[in-house]
Image: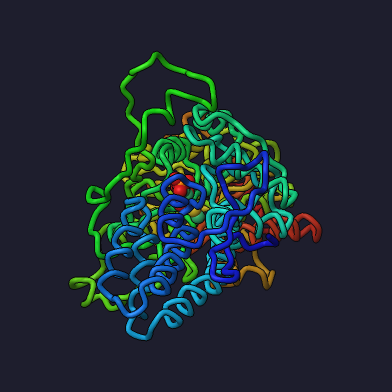
Amino acid sequence: MGEGSISWVDGAVVTIDQRALPHEVRTLRLTTVDQVIDAIATLAVRGAPAIGVCAAFGVALAAREHGGDTARVEAEAVRIEAARPTAVNLSWGVRRALVQLPGGPEAVLAEARAMLDEDGRVNRAAAGHAADLVQRLCPARPLRILTHCNTGRLATTAFGTAIGALRVLHARGAVDSVLVDETRPLLQGARLTTWELAEAGITHRLTVDSAAAWAMATGQVDCVIVGADRITADGAVANKIGTYGLALAARHHGIPFIVVAPESSRDIATATGAEIIVEQRGADEITTIGDYVAAPAGTEVFNPAFDVTPPELVTAVVTENGLIEDASPAPSSPESRGGGEHPEVAAAADRTAETVLGADIAAVAAELYARGWMPGTAGNISARDGAAAVITGSGLSKGQLSPADMVRVRIDDAEVVTGARRPSAETTIHTAIYRSTDAGAVVHVHSPHATAATCHGATTLRFGGFELIKGLAGGETVDVPVFANHREVAQIGTDVARYLDANPTAPPVLCIAGHGITAWGTDLAQARDRAECLEALCELASLTGRHDITTRIFEEQAQ
Ligand code: MRU
């Protein structure tokens, strides 16, 4: 059936029977409303976008069958809409087709065909945006991505949403491997996602759903990407049962949790996730596995097909319009949304911003590590985020950080707010700088020339005569303080704070004896530039032998 999974051929909806996979690629021809309803209810056709388009063709079949009997077609539409309650795409597909009913059966069919045409384009756009975001959030290495259920060309009509993002990342050479949840009880992951990933040549491993949290705990997951069946106005996400648990585990481990879905999966008419109807399915889906009876006869079950992940656990929802907090869904104006941005939407934007900040820190760290300025696990980087700072975790190689390796600490007292790692041992120096200056970012590197220059007991490095001084200060000379390297890091923080409070015009750089450079600026790039500038001055002083000024300071200290 090529790359699409649904088509309209000679008066029939032609699709792949997803119940038969992976054993058999069986074609299904649906020519009546009852067949459409049965295919959707039994998951022969499944996945929110796929059932939306299939439902629209169901309305087209009803319109062809009942001609001008509008009431009859509408009654059939209601039956189709009731086939599964959770995915909003089902009623979206039905409603969109029904709007064309006054134009006659051919108009309804044309609308269903238009939806089919759109779906692949929409999925490609959403997948591209999601891949861009994932690469911004996790820039450091080929990605280990975990996914749940099936969100590929089977679940849509072409390309896929979350799996679409995997396709894009794979095409960019950015995927190491995909961890596929088997997705109990109907095994959409084991039966369908593995089949699609094999077809696409994407390296993957299948695992039981209950291994996902452990995979995260053992550092095997950089990012979780899933689809959605309904996204409410507050940003809550209904998706295959097990998604909520993944989001909880991802949050605990500081791993980005990305939802990729078309705008047609958004339901802004429903205010919160609490209002979503979660489909409950039959006991036999749990008590039997194929022909195998897995539980005593008559065992009661709890078999919700979906769960609802609250917005605070979702890093970002990405649609064909980009991140939903950036997109302009109808109604688009703040007024039409009820007077200003919804606080939950703003909170979602904050969470995304925090993860993006972590990714930016990781990118600068990787660059400075590659230069040899953060040897071993040395150095640390932070950025201000309101009353908190996001800082690199302690004891980690700076060449391979991801947002999950960052810790959020309070600027007031350096206490940890969130994060699975221990914060850098030098956090108190960073927070002292944030308290005493308006710095937006702080970079601490063990670059060789500055480290060497501070090993002679000087308390100040004075530079004069180099044009580069302009990168740090306005005058002819610049005095860079060298702080004693106390074993108690908090003591260094106290010294730094006292010095900065007493010297409001001090240059935005300092050294700690034998301990490299600490530089700050409005953002990470400026803090890095200033560290570069000071390191270059130390190197030039050493190369040119112009130690006249610095030596005098050294000698003064020695007396
Ligand atoms: O019961 P299913 O298999 O239809 O559930 C499907 C899912 O939960 C998918 O993740 C969702 O529909 C998105 S498909 C692009």
Residue found 47% across the figure and 51% down from its top: 39
Judged from this view, the residue extending furthest toward the left is 339
| Corner quadrant of residue 247 | top left
What residue is shown at x 55% (from left), y 34% (from top)? 182
Q: Does residue 491 appear left or right of residue 102 in this picture?
A: right
Nearer the observer, 243 or 361: 243
Of residue 109 and residue 272, the one placed in the foreground of this image is 109
Where residue 553 sits: x, y (%)? 61, 51
Q: Most extreme residue toward the top, as rendered?
A: 296
Q: Nearer the viewer, residue 253 or 526?
A: 253
Q: Is residue 307 visible?
A: yes
Asked whether 346 or 311 is in front, the reply is 311
According to the image, what is the colour scheme of the structure?
rainbow
Count of picture labels: 0
Residue at left 36%, top 37%?
281
Give the residue drawn at x 62%, y 50%. Answer: 365
Residue 433 visible to an observer of this rendering:
no
State the image coordinates of residue 150 (x, y, percent, origin top left): 54, 47
Q: Is 420 drawn above or below residue 450 in the view shown?
A: above
Q: Quadrant of residue 509?
A: bottom right
Q: Position of residue 341 (x, y in %)?
A: 26, 68
Horizontally, is 101 left or right of 196 in the view?
left
> In the picture provided, is 515 more to the left or to the right than 339?
right
Q: State the quadrant of the N terminus.
A: bottom right
Q: Look at the image and tell me in which quarter the C terminus lies.
A: top right
What is the x, y in percent for residue 411?
A: 35, 47
Q: Is residue 115 above or below residue 235?
A: below
Q: Is residue 411 above or below residue 53?
A: above
